[in-house]
Image (cartoon, rainbow, N blue to C red):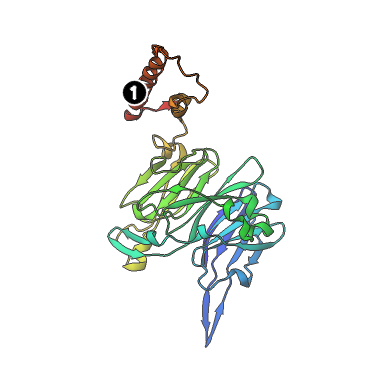
Amino acid sequence: SPFRIRADRCGRLWVLDTGVEELLGNTTVTSPTSLLVYDLHNDNLLRRYKFPADHQKENSFYANIAVEDTDCDDTFAYAADLGSPGLVVYSWKQQESWRVKHHFFHPDPLAGNYNITGINFQWDDGLFGIALKPQSDGYATLYFHPLSSLNEFSVSTKVLRNQTYATDSSNYHEFKILGSRGPNGQAGVAFVDQKTGVIFYALPNLNAITCWKTSNRAYTIKSLGRVYMSTVDMVFPNDVKVDDESNLWVLSDRLHQYMYESLNRNDINFRVLTATVKDAIQNTACDTNIKPLPDIITNLGDILRPSTTTVAPKVGSSGVDALHFTTSAMALFSIVIVLLSSNFCFRI
């Protein structure tokens, strides 16, 4: 049961096979979750790696994969288990894997309700969306979130690629919470565009694709950009990818309708939508042509904050200098308020 695929920069296709259970006579035969890696140049199967028995928990369902391919001979694949929350790290070079646990992989009990096109249901899915952004230290940042959660998290693959440290509970604080997407912000798959550093999310509860600039220090509702929303074209966005030519691709498939009602065979139920990354993020909070506010505004708090080294005015002083400072600060503050209230932005 191949569920997710990922082509890497080394000409290989990684296929995540979730495995199946078959009833043969009176015996149930289980095929374990596996990674199959093909050579895209000739379609040959390069490797099939079956997950060890201790990776398969009672409710395990590995539903997503990310591939760190900076070094073709030392590639790492990451597989997300949403059913029994955990992350499997697979080393191409070592030909072995280890399973990582963390509290942040688990679903939020307050974020398990879904209402899509009038169909209401509840899911308690854990770790699902995973996306990688290479860093200058030779490792990458793994952005991740459970499906039934409003929050986004991150961890360096420097932690994950060290088998001893990755499987030790002492690494707890290496995992960071970035922020919340707000009400109905449950996110499915995610993908980082390597050229702009923008991460794209599929939001099934909102029938939308949203984005966030990974260079942005703040992860808030206001810092997220709305790329596209539609109750016709984007009903249950189920996969998101960016290709090497900076094109964004989205698959929508009305999965919830298939599961809880039935698909109308006279309607269009499956769609592939595409746009260039440049067009997708234009005029959103992810637009890379928009500069942040000037430092004078960002550092306004430092300007207005009284200095602890200022010499107090002499007794009997007119206090003109202090009054001048206060008036200047208030004038500057007024200018900032005008800029912010007018949605002022700076462009290159």
The residue at 38%/11% (across/down) is 318
In the displayed image of the protein, which residue is found farthest to the left?
118
Question: Who is closer to the viewer here, 11 or 127?
Answer: 127
Q: How far across and how far down the image is residue 95, in percent? A: 70, 61
- Secondary structure, mark 1, is helix
Question: Who is closer to the viewer here, 38 or 254?
Answer: 254
Q: How far across and how far down the image is residue 130, in percent? A: 52, 53
Residue 12 seen in this snapshot: yes
Relative to 83, say whether 287 is above or below. Answer: above
Question: Who is closer to the viewer here, 51 or 221?
Answer: 221
**Could you classify mark 1 by the number of other residues whose Cα lies within 10 Å: few (under 14), some (14-19), or many (20 or more)?**
few
Question: Who is closer to the viewer here, 100 or 282?
Answer: 100
Relative to 230, say whether 14 is above or below. Answer: below
User: What is the tally of numbered marks visible in this picture?
Assistant: 1
Q: How far across and how far down the image is residue 299, in percent? A: 47, 28
Question: Residue 33 occupies which quadrant of the picture?
Answer: bottom right
Q: Is residue 82 left or right of residue 171?
A: left
Q: Is residue 224 left or right of residue 169?
A: left
Q: Is residue 335 left or right of residue 215?
A: left
The residue at 50%/20% (across/down) is 310
Residue 41 seen in this snapshot: no
Q: How far across and how far down the image is residue 311, in percent? A: 50, 18
In the displayed image of the protein, which residue is found farthest to the front?
315
Q: Is residue 179 left or right of residue 76?
A: left
Disc 1 target residue: 334
Residue type at mark 1 is Ser
